[in-house]
Image (cartoon, rainbow, N blue to C red):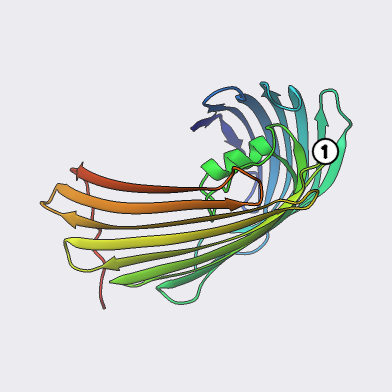
């Protein structure tokens, strides 16, 4: 169980139609059940240049001070990122490209330097279909990974294996295709990731995929289902974990404000580590009351 808070101001000064300096700060907390909470203070400065009608170039400097509680590998750390960003706003095509460098100074440890490269791109092929691509090669840590998972990435976070606070090089690639029609829709997602720790002997790589299905049977009845698969292989010692999960359910609208949801789920883990295998089966029956719009109208033309 985790809770995340981030708040702070942004200040922008438009010098002319093409140049806009931006400054800002953030205070953040990350609280989990049990030990391992963290606090973060971030400050940043950016210079935005409107290069084209849709494209913006910016020079960015970000500095972050993190205070970590046990059992973190260190109690304080300062992270600095200096990078150039190219950004196009959402539309038929949206792209964000970051290139730069990272420096991390943890207490009681050596300074760590690395490059920063991130690409996020989405392209709308038809009015119903969309393709997304994410590529990243950067220095990260387990707390940052957890925060990104709470921020709803392309795939749900698959869990952090090591003790919080360890620093590592993260390489990741995501690919997704979504087709949402008026009655039937589906999404296919897949990703690959490799984690190389700076001091910990627990390097691993993982592959994952997901299938999501949605079917509007009638104005009052909807079906949904999804299946996930993940395979994690440790590189420093002999261990492989395989996680599978599937879920299916139906939502039936009894009245304008009252709905009935029935759902079943199965989760399974297979591991070469003795005692780590398990199967979890769940069923849920939910009565939901809402005065808002539960079913948004969609044109069938």
Q: How dense is the environment of label 1, judged by Cα within 10 Å: few (below 14), some, or many (20 and up)?
A: some
Q: How many marks?
A: 1
Q: Secondary structure at mark 1?
A: strand
Residue bearing mark 1: 103
Q: State the residue at coordinates (49%, 65%).
A: 91
Quick check: 17 left or right of 257? right
Q: Residue furthest left?
A: 255
Residue 108 appears anywhere in the view: yes
Quick check: 20 left or right of 252? right
Q: State the residue at coordinates (16%, 55%).
A: 253
* Rendered view: 104 above or below 284: above
Quick check: 27 left or right of 251? right
Q: State the residue at coordinates (69%, 35%).
A: 44
Q: State the residue at coordinates (65%, 44%).
A: 15
List x then y, in percent, for residue 176. Answer: 54, 66
List x then y, in percent, for residue 229. Answer: 54, 60
The foreground one among 280 and 252 is 280
On-image quarter of the C terminus = bottom left
Residue 97 appears anywhere in the view: no
Q: Residue furthest right?
A: 110
* Rendered view: 267 above or below 41: below
The foreground one among 190 and 202 is 202
The foreground one among 201 and 238 is 238
Q: Quadrant of residue 108?
A: top right
Q: Residue furthest front?
A: 274
List x then y, in percent, for residue 139. Answer: 77, 45
List x then y, in percent, for residue 58. Answer: 70, 50
Q: Quadrant of residue 72?
A: top right
């Amino acid at each position: 169980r985790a809770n995340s808070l981030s708040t702070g101001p942004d200040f922008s000064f438009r010098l002319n139609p093409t140049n806009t300096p931006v400054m800002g700060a953030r205070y953040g907390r990350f609280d989990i059940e049990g030990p391992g909470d963290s606090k973060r203070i971030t400050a940043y400065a950016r210079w935005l240049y409107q290069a084209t009608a849709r494209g913006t170039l910016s020079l960015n400097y970000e500095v972050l001070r993190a205070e970590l509680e046990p059992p973190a590998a260190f109690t304080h750390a300062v992270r600095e990122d200096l990078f150039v960003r190219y950004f196009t706003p959402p539309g038929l095509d949206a792209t964000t490209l970051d290139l730069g460098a990272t420096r991390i100074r943890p207490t009681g440890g050596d300074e760590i330097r690395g490059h920063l490269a991130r690409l996020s791109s989405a392209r709308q092929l038809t009015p119903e279909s969309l393709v997304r691509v994410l590529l990243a090669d950067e220095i990260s840590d387990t707390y940052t990974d957890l925060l990104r998972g709470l921020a709803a990435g392309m795939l749900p976070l698959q869990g952090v294996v090591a003790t919080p606070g360890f620093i590592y090089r993260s390489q990741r690639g995501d690919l997704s295709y979504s087709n949402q029609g008026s009655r039937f829709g589906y999404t296919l997602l897949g990703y690959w990731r490799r984690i190389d720790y700076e001091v910990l002997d627990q390097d691993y790589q993982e592959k994952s995929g997901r299938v999501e299905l949605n079917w509007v049977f009638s104005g009052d009845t909807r079906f949904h289902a999804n299946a996930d698969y993940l395979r994690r292989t440790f590189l420093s010692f002999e261990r492989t974990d395989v996680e599978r999960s599937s879920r299916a359910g139906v939502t039936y609208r009894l009245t304008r404000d009252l709905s009935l949801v029935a759902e079943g789920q199965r989760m399974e883990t297979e591991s070469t580590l003795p005692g780590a295998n398990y199967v979890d089966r769940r069923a849920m029956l939910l009565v939901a009351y809402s005065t808002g719009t539960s079913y948004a109208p969609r044109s069938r033309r």
